[in-house]
Image (tube, rainbow, N blue to C red):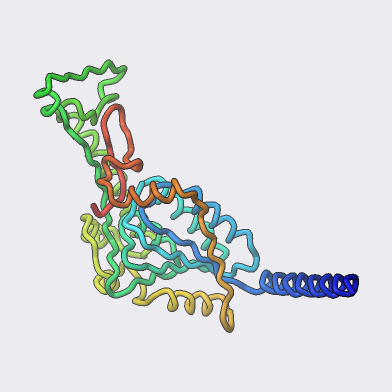
Amino acid sequence: MKKKTKRIFIIILVVLVAVVGIRTVRDTMTPAIGILEVNGPILDSLSYLEIIRGFEEDEQVKGVIVRLDSPGGRVGPSQEVYEALLRLKETKPVVASMASISASGAYYIACAADTVYALSGTLTGSIGVILEFIDVSEGLSKLGVRARSITGGSLKDAGTPFRPMSEDERKYFEALARDVHEQFMEAVAQSRGLDAATVKEYADGRVFTGRQALAIGLIDKLGGYDDAIEDVKEKTGMEGKPRIIRPQESEGVLQGIKRLIQSYVPVQFRGDAGRLSDGYLRLEYSIQ
């Protein structure tokens, strides 16, 4: 009796494994839409680049939706993701779907898409660059604390919080911000098919609602996530309910807590603040 029960159990197990295996093979052979989620501050690009590369190499991924809910972030990562999506767009359609906010670096990324969707109340745009510094020299002097630095270049400690900024340093940082801002405007003009003068008119750092952005050509259509899915289906000729691939960035408890804290702490005290010499410098696409 025990042997018979054991055989039945083994048969059931084999059948279950076979069913799961067949279903898995069937699923992997079904055309899919890849979802790249850009949530929160854009601090790094590696995880996004790995996902994009995976979509590029997966023959079953016929198109990609970039789902954005981000206020922006660092310059470099935003540009890197933008460039990666431009390369992906050469072989597969890319559609951007904006949630509650897609501004600054997030808007930069969205510009790489074939079609950009936003909700009527989405906050987007913020085509601008900001550099922030802290000057604690007056407070420290009242405490009798002085700071000294020895440098091998006149601008090596530019931006230090331990003394007021000189006029030459101010001009230096203004030139940096201006150059990065011009790069941003050039990318928007090229990707959105707008002339430079039009982009410059709206590139003063302000945000727009989705409805306003549509009127001035910063997005293509008003719509949500489902509209983006239907758009990709139409572009790729997919029929029926598509398979959705949504890779998740693996992060431990400590990383999750850190990301949560970074969302609330003023940026000049956060880990995403760029550091220049002994001062705190934030150079990013931001709405703050």
The N terminus sits in image quarter: bottom right
- Most foreground residue, 195 or 128: 128
- Most foreground residue, 149 or 9: 9
- Most foreground residue, 160 or 156: 160
Residue 158 placement: quadrant? top left
Determine if residue 250 is in view.
yes
Give the image location of residue 22, x and y in percent.
75, 73
Relative placement, left or right, of 50 versus 215 is right
Q: How many numbered marks does the figure carry?
A: 0
Tell me what residue is drawn at x 48 percent, y 76 percent.
229
Extreme-bottom residue of the structure: 240
**Vertical order, 50 against 4 (above or below):** above
Tell me what residue is drawn at x 18 percent, y 29 percent.
168
Determine if residue 186 is in view.
no
**Vertical order, 207 against 9 (above or below):** above
Extreme-front residue of the structure: 1
- Most foreground residue, 90 or 36: 36
**Vertical order, 55 against 231 (above or below):** above
Give the image location of residue 55, x and y in percent.
58, 61
Relative placement, left or right, of 187 versus 24 is left
Tell me what residue is drawn at x 20 percent, y 19 percent.
147
Give the image location of residue 287, x and y in percent.
25, 54
Residue 111 placement: quadrant? bottom left
Tell me what residue is drawn at x 36 percent, y 72 percent.
220
